[in-house]
Image (cartoon, rainbow, N blue to C red):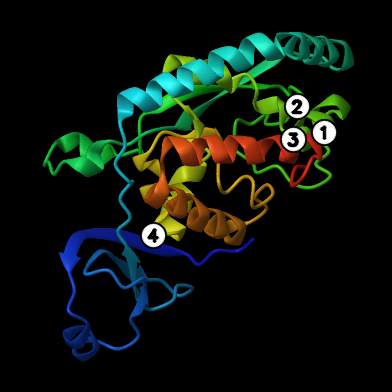
């Protein structure tokens, strides 16, 4: 995986007239056709593409947060009760097959409500992209998988993954502990997958529209997860972002229930996981 190196400076949101745009400068790249666009000016380095990138602003479809919260709590609570025997079996298998804890937790980037408000608050100077939270998973790798503390993407045939962990990742069962995150209000059952802060910062710089997916709570499953396998490079993430933004545009309780139902065959037939 090789990304262009660039220094990115946010210059805000502005209206762009298409006719004037052509007269202003050449070599401008545009994605989407909305009257209001996010403008990101790229200062080129010797490896960077000399262009200005525009990304169409995507806002989540309005829905009742109270109703959504109730549905998520009920679904998560029922799932935990029904799946408790399976969760216990998975925990025993992990404990007996490899050294280390059963559960694994990581700091992830969550919901960002700030897009709703304009503010000159100095804290924006240290914008991490959303509220940080601790996300829980079943441990699928050796305890020394990231011994230096650096975030590294998992890959196919990753030697760090344990035997039990490989089955859990393929079946997506390693995500079950996140039902607890749903009960805590940090996640929804359905939504874009949350990312680690260091990887989030890189992806936000490489993909102009990436930060928009934080406008809804992250989820255990999502429209991107049932349509594409795990990420192996930035291009994979870019495709997933398109699915995530498509979900934002049409989010609803009915849509969430539909995605939940489509997740079941993904888990049963171990589609897209490795």
Q: Quadrant of the C terminus?
A: top right
Quarter of the figure with residue 131:
top left
SS class, disc 3:
helix
The alpha-carbon separation of the residues under discs 4 and 3 comes to 31 Å
137 displayed left or right of 240: right
Crowd rating for badge 3 (residues with CA inside 10 Å; few <14, some 14–19, many 20+): some
Q: In screen coordinates, is 148 left or right of 144?
A: left
Where is 215 relative to 172, above or below? below
> Eyeballing the image, is 71 above or below 84?
below
- Asked whether 19 or 24 is in front, the reply is 19
Closer to the chain start, of discs 2 and 1, is 2
Q: Nearer the viewer, residue 133 or 48?
A: 133
Write down the residue under mark 4.
208
Question: Mark 4: which secondary structure?
Answer: loop
Among numbered discs 4 and 1, the one appearing first in the sequence: 1
Q: Which residue is at a point 71% across and 33% down the rendered structure image?
A: 172
Marks 4 and 1 sit apart, C-alpha to C-alpha, by 33 Å
**x and y, in percent, of residue 85 in the image:** 76, 9
Where residue 145 appears, as percent x and y from the top left, is 73, 30
Q: Residue 166's mark? A: 1
Which residue is labeled 3 in the image? 267
């Amino acid at each position: 995986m090789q990304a262009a190196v660039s220094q990115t400076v946010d210059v805000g949101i502005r209206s762009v007239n298409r006719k004037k745009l052509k007269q202003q400068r050449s070599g401008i790249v545009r994605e989407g056709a909305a009257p209001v666009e996010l403008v990101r000016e790229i200062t080129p380095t010797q490896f960077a593409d000399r262009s200005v990138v525009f990304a169409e602003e995507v806002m989540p479809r309005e829905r009742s947060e109270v109703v959504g919260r109730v549905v998520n709590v009920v679904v998560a609570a029922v799932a935990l009760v029904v799946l408790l025997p399976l969760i216990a079996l998975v925990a025993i298998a992990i404990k007996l097959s490899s050294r280390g804890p059963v559960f694994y937790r990581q700091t992830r980037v969550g919901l960002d409500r700030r897009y709703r408000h304009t503010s000159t608050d100095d804290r924006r100077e240290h914008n991490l992209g959303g509220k940080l939270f601790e996300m829980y998973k079943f441990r699928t790798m050796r305890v020394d998988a990231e011994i230096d503390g650096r975030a590294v993407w998992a890959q196919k045939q990753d030697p760090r993954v344990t035997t039990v962990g490989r089955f859990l990742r393929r079946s997506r069962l390693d995500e079950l502990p996140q039902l607890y995150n749903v009960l805590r209000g940090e996640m929804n059952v359905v939504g874009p997958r949350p990312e680690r802060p260091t990887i989030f910062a890189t992806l936000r710089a490489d993909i102009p529209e990436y930060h928009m997916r934080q406008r809804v709570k992250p989820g255990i499953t999502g429209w991107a997860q049932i349509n594409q396998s795990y990420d192996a490079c930035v291009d994979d993430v870019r495709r997933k972002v398109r699915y995530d933004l498509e979900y934002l545009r049409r989010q609803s309780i009915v849509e969430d229930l539909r995605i939940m139902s489509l997740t079941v065959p993904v888990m049963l037939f171990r589609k897209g996981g490795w």
